[in-house]
Amino acid sequence: MATVTAAKKRTVRINGCVASAQAAKYADVDVIAAYPIRPYTATMMALAQMVANGELDAEYIVADSEHSQLSIAHGASSSGARVFTGSSGVGVQFAYELYSPISGSRMPVQMMIADRTLDPPGDFGSEHTDALSTRDMGWLMGWACDAQEAFDNHLMAFRIGEDRRVLLPQMVCQDGFFVSHITSDVELPDSGQVKEFLPPYKHPYPLDPRHPVSHGPQIMPEQGPPLQLERARAMEDSMAVIEEVHDEFAKIFGRRYDPWVEEFMTDGADVVFFMQGGHAVTARFAIQHMREKGLKVGLVRLRTIRPYPTDRVKDVLSKFKVVGVIETNMGLGSPSSGGVLYADACAALYESDKRPLVVSFMAGMGGEAIVLKEFYWMTEKMLEAQKRGKIEKRTHWVGFEE
Amino acid sequence: MATIEVQRQLLPILDNPNQGARFYNPELPSSEPFVPGHRTCAGCGPSIQYRMTSKAAGDNTILVGPTGCMYVANSSYLCTPYNVPWAHTQIGSAGSFTAGVAAAYEAMIRKGKWKGAYPNIICEAGDGSASDIGLASISGALYRNHDCLIICYDNEQYANTGIQASSRTPYGGMTTFSPPGPEVPEGKKLFPKDLARMMAAGHPHCYVATASVGYPIDLMNKVRKGLNHKGAAYLMIYTPCQKGFVYETPRSIDLGRLVVECGLYPIWEWNPEKRAFDYSFRPQSMRPVSEYLKLQGRFGHLHAEHIATLQKFANEQWRMMGVELPEPLLQAADAKNLVNMASAAEATAVAETV
């Protein structure tokens, strides 16, 4: 099939949404399920044009809702096709019913998320609550911080999710606007490299009339636990595959990512930010400025949240005195009364002999940029806690306090 | 882009000279994609329909089963009645999951990833899925014209969950969500959604038809016509539910004929080429609705006025089919000429104790 065979390695200036569309094209997806909602829509617009131009041979379906998008993806993946879909904000939640059935039937559907706040009140900005609310449904999940990383994550996620040892769906997330709509240089690979990296999708038990199988029959209560255990094990077992695939990716494409956390200027740091997504780009600048002033601050960016790299997070965060979790999500009534990242980080640290102080920052809410002076303010709060040996309170709403 | 042409199946239409008559054609296909041994109730209309449908389709077929009786009662883990691939999907995903299967096969065959003739892709949705929660997904699949057949096996209620009213439950039908009582003596007050007509009117490029388990050859031929139609097709099939309708189990096929003979379930086809309804199907005889109602416990509470209301409804259906109404049916639409159901007083007393 003459889909991307002519492509040679080249650098283009594109935004995160288009980078995701490019990745789907390089993966030679068979079925695409679209439904409009900002900001992820731009990915589907780009794919529609690729199909119209004859650059990509895929069934492009404009669904009647996100629920239908995910159902289409489920049906197509169950039949043996490589499937790509996506959404944002309340769209992610409209499809909620399908997340468990898709991972439960072990269909490696790929979904692109460009984050958007949930309603109320119809805010366009990026907040990670949309995808995070589905984090325990059996999908592999992680955030990119720029367009290049988004492109790379999509390719790696296909390879990981479709691996016979894993067979799980993937949510490949990026911040709405900060990543999805900001253009930057993205290196697009030679199609031969992708061919070498990503073998064709072949599910072991597709819906094929020559080998009849029944998917998802009704079960008795005692038949439930073994199936749930298998799914839990697939999630655990994916960790080795994730590491393997990141190594292979580095060999073929020359870009090496730590699959779990990125550490930035953590050498000799006393206090660190712990966060995911696009605001980490601003954090890097802020940290460089503060380091120049002699403040011992660093950044630990979580790249994969499901499966959660518990041991790695424990080992990395235990090196510091204070950890400031930047949430960019809502966890109303959660343990910190802030976001949901705090609880996962604290759970990882519980078994540590050297537990740092942990404080949660509600920043970037509503899709506001987290500006440099807010990073300085948060650093100040962490340094005060270090001096005091005690946090002032579990959660600070940044911008609402002195 | 070099692509491979998708080859489609063409199924022969069975000989059916007396379509409305009360007898079987013995020349049925021998294939049984839906085998016995499942856990449906005795006399289950939907499973009778399922056997006929899958028999008509043959072995190069994929079945999609949204949640409902035909999922829960048929499949049980490590034991399945399907000899062809089958997948459960969510009750609201009838049309969308099916669309995904169809799209996958279009793409995989075209791109050389799967070799063979395009399979029959059939969705078996109950009326709860088809008329309520999955309506939009089915409309989407029909509108986009995926090459598939979507069947609504219409037992006029949510049966699997314990008999609740759906938008297909008839006026006067008792369900656990539409019980009769002193304030609401008729039980269900609303008339059913005219689902098949909605599908034909809104998706005129599709083959759409109604059928009943009372007329197996007609039903199987419509399955084949729907599958042969290149694009989306929709069938709404009357399938009585012994548990919900409350009748003697051997009478499922009788009810499938009576409902048509009483004018409560018009049998028709929408011809997408001519863009016209075909109302030529005629049952062997015409009867008043009371002959159908009196066999079922779900109508046992009805008073003369309610029966007359249902007769008026049936008469409207006959007129729509272009049938001239005989005098007895016109008289049966007047409550003065009718009596309450024999069990009506008893039913009211039972309802009052709840």
Image: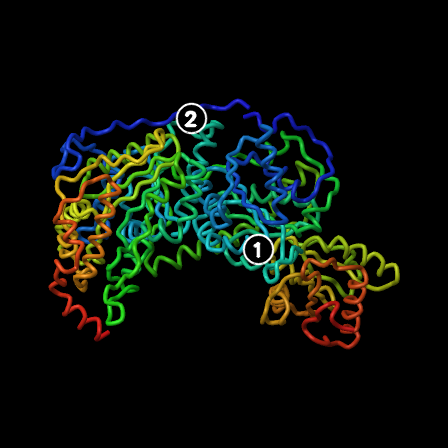
Q: What element carries label 2?
A: loop
Location of residue B58 by image quarter = top left
Query: Label 1 is placed on what type of residue?
Result: Arg
In front of the other: A21 or B291: B291
Which quadrant is the N terminus of chain A positioned in?
Answer: top right
The correct choice, above or below, for A325 with respect to B256 in the image is below
Which residue corresponds to mark 2?
Answer: B6
The picture places residue B104, in percent across and down from the top left corner, at: 45, 36
Q: Which residue is drawn at 64% across and 52% down?
A: A143
Horizontal and vertical percent position of residue A109: 51, 45
Q: Position of residue B87 (x, y in %)?
A: 37, 45
Say which mark, if any, is on residue A306.
1
User: From this viewpoint, which residue is outermost toward the right?
Assistant: A293
Q: Which chain carries label 1?
A: A
Q: Could you tell whether B263 is left or right of A146 in the image?
A: left
Q: Nearer the viewer, residue A326 or A369?
A: A369
The CA distance from mark 2 to mark 1 is 40 Å
Is residue A204 shown to the viewer in this render?
A: no
- Tell me which amino acid carries mark 2: Val
Q: Quadrant of residue A392?
A: bottom right
Above or below, A183 against A345 in this view is above
Q: Determine the chain carrying the residue at label 2.
A: B
Determine whether, in the image, residue A263 is placed left or right of residue A65: right
Could you tell me which quadrant the C terminus of chain A lies in?
bottom right
Res A383 → quadrant:
bottom right
